[in-house]
Every structure is written in C-alpha cells, then in structure tokens.
Amino acid sequence: MADNGPVLEMTREEFEELVAEALDRIPPELTRLMDNVAVFVEDEPPADDPELLGLYEGTPLTDRGEWYAGVLPDRITIYRGPTLRMCASREDVVAETEVTVVHEIAHHFGIDDARLHALGYG
C-alpha cells in the first residue's frame, strides 16, 4: 500500500457500498451475536487522529452486565478519507476496508488491539 502520490478517487456512496460488502462477508454466526451496534461511514476522523481508519465507541459484549439496558447502540465508524489516502488501488481499498470493519467489530466482541494485531487485523 502506498502513502504517497495522488489520492484514489471514490465517491462516498461507492465507499459505503464497500463497507456494506465487508459487513456482508462477516460470518452469519457472528453477525447473529452482534447486539445493539450501528455502523457509519464518515469522510474524515477527528482532527486529533487524522490517520484513523475506524473507531469503535460503546460497551463491548464482554463488559455488559445486568445493568446494560436502554442504552444507545454502540457505534462503529469507518473513515473514507484516510483509507483512500493510504491505498494505491481499488483492490487495496476493498482489502483495507474489510480489515478495518473486522477490526472494529472485534472490539464490539471485546477483542483488544494487541490480540487483533497478533491475528493480522492491525
């Protein structure tokens, strides 16, 4: 993957479709276990982390207890801008988007960054 040269062009709609396709490739036995989580696409991450590809915000399934009721859904956000800037081709974007989606869903399941990096979902 390249991090220099021209930025790959892709509309927000095309990128949202790639995120939807990545979600569709998550095995059904896992998606059935996902609970109270919504996935969003944004163009850019927060200014203090401009290279952030994705973000999970919420309470992982492993941390939910009897108190967990009536709360807003967990939020997974996938960022289009940094993904396009780091990728040299559409194929790179497809692969990176899939890794990012899996990475953020894993956080929903309570898997931390160290374990994700060990599994190749850095």
Image: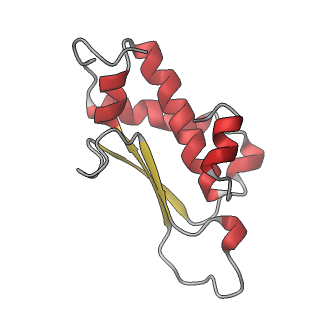
Question: Residue 45: where, in percent of width, then height?
Answer: 30, 47
- Looking at the image, is 78 positioned above or below residue 93? below
Q: Is residue 55 left or right of residue 109?
A: left
Question: Residue 75: where, in percent of width, then height?
Answer: 46, 60
The residue at 26%/28% (across/down) is 11
Colour convention: secondary structure
The total of numbered circles placed on residues is 0
Q: Quadrant of residue 90?
A: top left
Is the C terminus in the top left, top right, bottom left or bottom right quadrant?
top right
The residue at 67%/59% (across/down) is 110
| Name of the residue lying farthest toward the right | 29
The residue at 65%/46% (across/down) is 114
Instruction: Give 104 or 112, whichever is nearer the viewer.
Output: 112
Question: Residue 71: where, in percent of width, then height?
Answer: 51, 79
The residue at 45%/17% (across/down) is 92
- Looking at the image, is 82 positioned above or below residue 71? above
Q: Is residue 8 left or right of residue 105?
A: left
Instruction: Give 4 or 102, whichever is nearer the viewer.
Output: 4
Question: Residue 33: where, in percent of width, then height?
Answer: 72, 57
- Looking at the image, is 23 positioned above or below residue 6? below
Is the N terminus in the top left, top right, bottom left or bottom right quadrant?
top left
Q: Quadrant of residue 43?
A: top left
Q: Is residue 17 left or right of residue 102?
A: left
Q: Is residue 51 left or right of residue 75?
A: left
